[in-house]
Amino acid sequence: MSAPVVNPVPVGVLVLRGERVESRHRVSYAVADATGALRHAEGESERPIFPRSAVKPLQALVLLESGAAGRFGVSQPELALACASHGGEPGHVDLVRRWLARLGLDQTALECGTHPPSHAPSAERLLAAGQTADPAHNNCSGKHAAMLTVARHIGAPLAGYIAADHPVQRLVAATLAEMAGLAAMPEPATDGCGIPTYPLTLAQLATAMARLADRRALSPARRAAGLEICRAMTAHPKLVAGSGRACTAIMTAAPDVVVKTGAEGVYAAALPKLGLGLALKVEDGAGRAAPVALVALLEALGALPKMASAALGETARPILRNHAGKVVGRIEPAPGWPRFWPEI
Amino acid sequence: MSAPVVNPVPVGVLVLRGERVESRHRVSYAVADATGALRHAEGESERPIFPRSAVKPLQALVLLESGAAGRFGVSQPELALACASHGGEPGHVDLVRRWLARLGLDQTALECGTHPPSHAPSAERLLAAGQTADPAHNNCSGKHAAMLTVARHIGAPLAGYIAADHPVQRLVAATLAEMAGLAAMPEPATDGCGIPTYPLTLAQLATAMARLADRRALSPARRAAGLEICRAMTAHPKLVAGSGRACTAIMTAAPDVVVKTGAEGVYAAALPKLGLGLALKVEDGAGRAAPVALVALLEALGALPKMASAALGETARPILRNHAGKVVGRIEPAPGWPRFWPEI
């Protein structure tokens, strides 16, 4: 029997009940520039993780670079939705349905599977109206509409567009590998929405995001695509996530940073003003800790305007209330975290 | 600035996507006998945690020892429900309503607050019927009915029975302290249902559970109460939690162990055949990891019959499926965990 794994991943986020720590979240992160040089890192920045939905802004490059977006008249809101893990609110779902209709398709073409809107009031309204969710409500439906658009554009079969050996996924994998500085992608696992999810280290993911932020070394076509993606996400933060969501709150408060959450405690960010990319992973996968860690890192990097920090309120430091509405605790960065060393 | 906290809490549970580890949960535990001697422990067995609902079987001692249960004819199913974090299924809610009615009360006397049934189909049926949840649907409503029963019995005010200085909560705190081997309880925080939650170390919680399992040193009244609680929980495992829940599955598969979950990744168990108590805490509070860790510990202790381990299936090792129903991963104990040393 091998010994249990005990890695030196520091505690980044605390959950307090009263004034006592109830639970702790360990966080690894990497901050890199577009050359791949690490500026800051703690924990396991060189261990592969699954970036999950945090790579949606990178996956969307294919929609633009392939020419599919131009040919099918993809709008800026639709581009934001292609990068989204949306809440399944009516505004998200209607936009996806109209996009699909323009391709002559409907939600039955989406292979992402079905789950109720993550936006609880939207899920409740659906149930109360006697309706059920369909694949357009899936948080990834915008990305899937984008992938169908690419498939249609390159003349590939629409059915099976989620398979790792489908031409669309091969294009996406090649683009991710180039952005992350890899010759080829490792074997993927399957994401929640059925497409391949490729393991990347936090350092590689941060590098890819830095190249989205600092596009000078990219090809002209990719440079233009990266700019359009950053513009679409920051112009339409409600489409990238939705009501009450951290991505939306952060990009609303700080319109010059591009942030994207991924399942199992992942966050990625492109910081155009600093020319840096950032990637973090909560070791235990907790979604509640990831935005708290992200905001603490953005503050430590000086990437947030002072007003933004104040405006973020409970996104940065959630207050915990019990079922009777009484404040019982809070979530906050651990004292002394992140621990940046002076730059060399 | 102090250095980030990095404690040697071993990884107990792994979340795999494909064959690669995606997330990891660290777990501390203590196994003690009724004298308070530690038999096994890893991680932070001496650090105070909030046991949350894992102490419900201990809190219920007061219902019996005070004479309240006898006077108000509390049935064995009601006693099981007093120890429950139930799913808010119709069977749970109806039983609570009938119990309250016997006291001349209804759900408005409950101060636990309201949340939708945690049993998703019950929550959906409620919404589809145009109804809303009330305090009887709260997972703690059985415990609160028990506390109202005690308040009525001792002639204390019913309103405010959740306050730390209310006679009922003082009785509960004194009983918990005695069971855990403490002279007095430390300052409490507030639980999800509004009552005080007192910090205990895992060693103290395991000791208290061992005294529920091995009752020889208890007073006659408490000995009888402890036996009734163990019998009620193991006779009615569906009332202690509900459909699809780990407590119910484990006590159904192994009817001679008493297990109780608590919020934020806590589990407590009383093992009458071994005369031992067990307490565990998932460092990050993840509910998905706690039953996996519990079953691994029960197996390592030889507390589960061989058939029970097989019958537990996805309670012991959950299979992860994506929104289209495809198997994408699993949750399982970390190799080599728990790491019991030979007994001295």
Image (cartoon, coloured by chain):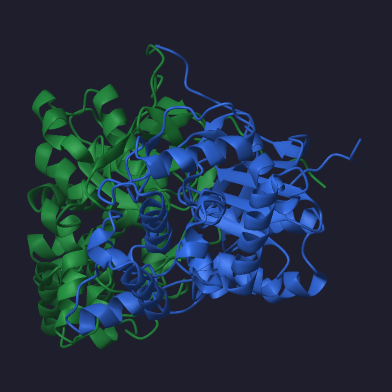
Chain colours: A blue, B green
Q: Quadrant of the N terminus of chain A?
A: top left
Q: Quadrant of residue B176?
A: bottom left
Please say whether residue B189 is visible from this viewpoint: no
Please say whether residue A231 is visible from this viewpoint: yes
At 53% from the left edge and 27% from the top edge, which residue is drawn?
Answer: A184
Rendered view: A235 above or below B159: above
Rendered view: B162 above or below A341: below
Total numbered circles: 0
Rendered view: A229 above or below B333: below
At 64% from the left edge and 65% from the top edge, which residue is drawn?
Answer: A316
Estimate the x, y position of residue B195 in percent, counting from the top left. Answer: 41, 69
B190 with respect to B270 (left or right): right
Estimate the x, y position of residue B265 in percent, counting from the top left. Answer: 40, 48
Q: Quadrant of residue B97?
A: bottom left
Estimate the x, y position of residue B218 in percent, counting from the top left. Answer: 27, 44
Depth order, front residue of B241/A91: A91
Estimate the x, y position of residue A298 in percent, counting from the top left. Answer: 73, 57
Q: Quadrant of the C terminus of chain A?
A: top right
A304 with respect to B92 (left or right): right
Depth order, front residue of B70/A266: A266
Depth order, front residue of B201/A277: A277
At 34% from the left edge and 51% from the top edge, which residue is drawn?
Answer: A193
At 78% from the left edge and 34% from the top edge, which residue is drawn?
Answer: A37
| Furthest residue in direction right, as rendered | A344
